[in-house]
Amino acid sequence: MGKQIVFIIALWFAATANAQKATLSFKQVDSTTYALFLKQDWKPIIKMGKQSRTEGIDFYYLKVRMGIAYFKENKMLSAIQFLEEAYTVDNYDVVVQEYLYWAYRYSGLELESRLFYSKMNKMLKDQINLVQPFVSALDFNVLTTNNLDYDEMLKEDAVSENNDIRFISKNYQLFSVGMNHPLSKRVNLYHQLSVMPTTSVQQENVAGILQNETYKGNESRYYTDVTVALGNRWYLDTYLNVIFGKYDNLNMDETIITTGNGRRSITSSSSTINYTDLVFGGSLTKASYFMRNSVNASVSNLNGLNQFQAGYSMALYPLGSTLVVPFGSIQYHSQDPDSNMVFTGGLSINTDKFSLTGFGTVGDLSNFIANNGAIIYNQSATALNEFGLSLQFSGKNSTVKVGYSFMEMEDNYYTEDFNITTKTFNFNQQNITAGITWKF
């Protein structure tokens, strides 16, 4: 009898604890969130919805109301989560369809919105009237670099010995024009043509006197990237960057000319040296509600050397929106006979009109690939790190962007026979970028 009484008391305590824990009921959640929805009081809907789901109370209209509430609060990724859940329950609801379509658009998941558009109610599609022009965007970008130590390097060099040679970059400018083409509901093409005039100096220590000879160069790049939406917010990118370049040959009487990063040997008696390099690669990306993950791989032959690169990138959306986005990546880079790791981290703060991004990259950026092959570090010198800041302003039909970055550079000395040595020198470089994109 005593054991039965103890068991009954234990059940009573458990029931009391559960009753105290379950402070909400289905009827209360439904009526309260509906009233708040009619009043367009979005934050209390989100708060009650979170509590309700925590206590195990969840239903179709709660998903819809929370999805729309997050949409109105400009938390598009969280809105997508709840609207997708609602769409799974009832894919005929045109209200859910409309909000989910625009949530994809406003969160930057352009291809996902195109895929979803084909599934929508015909009347709603006619209302939105999605048009895919042959050219959806046109952009123009400028990058200009400057060797901050250039003047001092021309005048003195405490490290060099007799017959030592080094190549000093003064500056270069990169002018790019790009176009975006929505080829179909699941395929997008972006391509860009760039030209890059350069000015550099070959410096030789002749019996303690520095002799400087200026030489010019010109490089052209054609970059193309195809993005395919695989469904369920999976994306596959394949890209190609073809580089054509030439520069003045100051040593045409020599049998061996060392170019690029100092490891390409060319025999030439021409007044110019010509080269062709290639970068090919791809990436696979999954855009989830609170995180975007991407793996990438590429092969290249920059400056006459074979390179392989593979890595992982991640962007976090801790608020379920694009308001505050920390991001980072780790890249493995192999270039015979060396290999190294490159780390990047940063933070982006975004509003409807403005975006502010700060980043830092640490590692040897020698013949290095970034941003799905759109950015290539193929200077003769190696960047040891880069730290930068960019500001972007978005208007109705255009986006303007400016940026600044600082890099610590390292390069090698050469013998009078143009053989690379282990002796190095350092300098600092700044980069200024500006660009504008027109959307059609």
Image: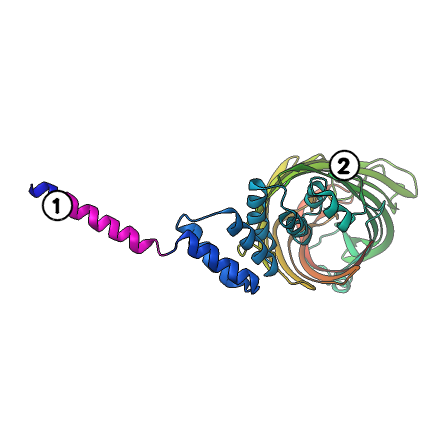
Q: Position of residue 267 (x, y in %)?
A: 85, 35
Would you say 420 lies left or right of 232 here?
right
Q: Position of residue 8 (x, y in %)?
A: 16, 45
Q: Position of residue 367 (x, y in %)?
A: 71, 43
Q: Which stretch appears magenta?
A: 5-23
- Neighbours of disc 2 within 10 Å: few (<14), some (14-19), many (20+): some
Question: At label 1, which amino acid type do we have?
Answer: Val
Q: Position of residue 333 (x, y in %)?
A: 63, 40
Is the residue 418 above or below the residue 208 in the image? Answer: above
- Is residue 331 among the parts visible in the rendering? no
Q: Is residue 302 magenta?
A: no
Depth check, front residue: 128 or 359? 128
Residue 6 tag number: 1
Disc 1, SS: helix
Q: Which residue is tagged 2?
A: 304
Would you say 349 lies left or right of 161 here?
left
Is the residue 49 above or below the residue 91 in the image? Answer: below
Q: Earlier in the sequence, mark 1 or mark 2?
A: 1
Is the residue 267 above or below the residue 291 in the image? Answer: above
- Prevailing SS of the magenta stretch: helix
Question: At label 2, which amino acid type do we have?
Answer: Gly
Closer to viewer: mark 1 or mark 2: 1
